[in-house]
Image (tube, rainbow, N blue to C red):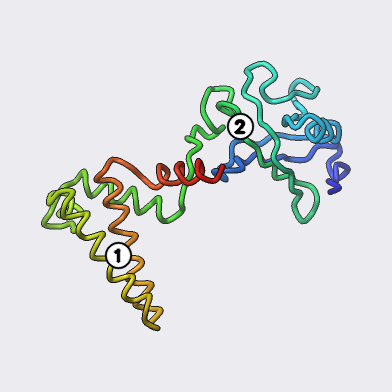
Amino acid sequence: MNPDFDKDKNGLIPAIIQDAITKNVLMLGYMNREAYEKTLETKKVTFYSRSRNKLWTKGEESGNFLNLVEIKEDCDKDTLLVNVHPQGPTCHTGTDTCWGEDNETKFGFLTELEDTIEQRRRDADAEKSYVASLFLKGINKIAQKVGEEAVETVIEAKDDDDDLFLNESADLLFHYLILLQAKGFRLKDVEKILKERSR
């Protein structure tokens, strides 16, 4: 890697800080060549402070270090993507990110679907919502639906109709997300178990 620190008259390039696990963007800082080299050497992310005109290692006062995993440069070699394991909150205000967001794992559309399921459960209008009607029928009915969808998925897996297999898989996953919430959990709780098993 050879970042181009000479493009900017001050010798600075932006460094986007991203959690290596959740992939959430935590903050944006600037590095000069010295900050970049110190980051590589110490494995603690170091920036150049434009307001103080000096290097500063994130966490040197708070203890909330950004432990380096890897650095990537963009196609123009003038922006860095820095993957880290954050040690505590990243923002000086005490939040996980400098945008005030929680640094939680998000599963794209599946997280949106989980949120929708949660909303339908809270609304509890069984006449308008299939999801609400399942929650009102209780855990036994929800578990039964997961079992039915699992059997149907297995049956379609043994045939050659990929469309039917994928549709049954979608039904299974949808009902499993409902079952998770009925038990008080979400996908992130299952992910945590899988991570622990992989160590």
182 on left or right of 78: left
Q: Which residue is mark 2?
A: 86
What percent of the width, then of the height, locates residue 4?
85, 46
Give the spatial CA distance, label 2 vs label 1.
Answer: 39 Å
Q: Please, what is the three-letter code of the amino acid marked with disc 2?
A: Pro
The image quadrant of residue 45 is top right
Lower position in the chain sequence, tag 2 or tag 1:
2
Point out the frontmost of discs 2 and 1: 1
Q: Identify which residue, 156 or 138, lies in the foreground.
A: 156
Front residue (pair 14, 63): 63
Which image quadrant is residue 90 in?
A: top right
Give coordinates of residue 56: x percent, y percent.
75, 23
| Residue type at numbered disc 1 | Ala
Residue 175 is tagged as none
Q: Residue at x 15, y 57 (%)?
A: 128
Tell how many labels. 2
The x, y position of residue 168, in whole percent, is: 32, 70
Q: What residue sits right under mark 1 in the picture?
A: 150
**Looking at the picture, how far across and down is residue 93, in whole percent?**
54, 22
158 with respect to 49 (left or right):
left
Q: Which element is circle 1 on?
A: helix
